[in-house]
Amino acid sequence: MPEKDTIVQQVLDNLSAELDFLLLLAIEDRMGLTKMGRRDVDFVYRTFKHASGTPVYIPPFVSLEEFKKDVDLSTWLRKVEKKLDLIITKVRDTALVSESEAYQSARLFYNSVKAAAKAGDEEAEKITRELAVHYKKKIESPEAAKKTSKEAAKNASNEEESLKEETKA
């Protein structure tokens, strides 16, 4: 919705500015970290409760203050993530519906202009030739498909690095 674009972009920019401490990890870094599942979250919270109540058992290299910061931040981020996930799901679903409807309208127009071209309309013939390119399938060798797949993976990695650099800036 173009009329809401400026407002939404501003809200997203403000959100990004407020969350300036967020990290963007490389895939390798992400893979090297210990992940918490549902049961692990409960374990961490219970452990923190016990560590707070009986600090005598805390190893000297573990800071209860840092432990609390990590627990509080992860709790808060999970709440934020849950809300953002819902928004992202709604954005994706709405985009899917609007794209589907736009594609359906495009196909209906294309079929209409094809019929007009068959009836001899010159303008319709020009349009049909231009739009027919979409339906021409390229036959690709397996080697070319692999190369394209590798290039896509490399591009995704480059995009991730670009995002990481933007976040640092």
Image (tube, rainbow, N blue to C red):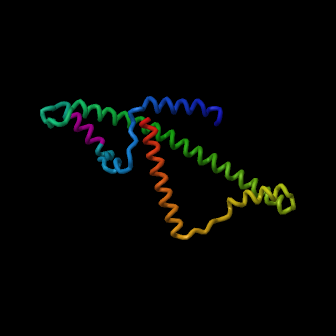
Rendered-image quadrant of the C terminus? top left
Image coordinates of residue 134 in percent, x first then y, are 68, 59
Q: Looking at the image, is 35 positioned above or below residue 8?
A: below
Magenta extent: 41-49
Q: On the rendered structure, is 49 left or right of 72?
A: left
Rendered-image quadrant of the N terminus? top right
Residue nearer the viewer, 69 or 21: 21
- Which residue is situated farthest in the left direction here? 56
Image coordinates of residue 131 in percent, x first then y, are 73, 57
Q: Looking at the image, is 127 positioned above or below residue 58?
A: below
Q: On the rendered structure, is 166 left or right of 128?
A: left
Residue at image location 34% in from the left, 51% down from the top = 31
Q: On the rendered structure, is 12 left or right of 63?
A: right
- Which residue is situated farthest in the right direction here? 120
Residue at image location 63% in from the left, 46% down from the top = 98
Residue at image location 29% in from the left, 35% down from the top = 70
Image coordinates of residue 86 in percent, x first then y, are 49, 40
Image coordinates of residue 128 in percent, x first then y, are 77, 58
Residue nearer the viewer, 150 or 83: 150
Residue nearer the viewer, 119 or 152: 152
Q: For the image shown, how many numbered marks are present on the structure?
A: 0
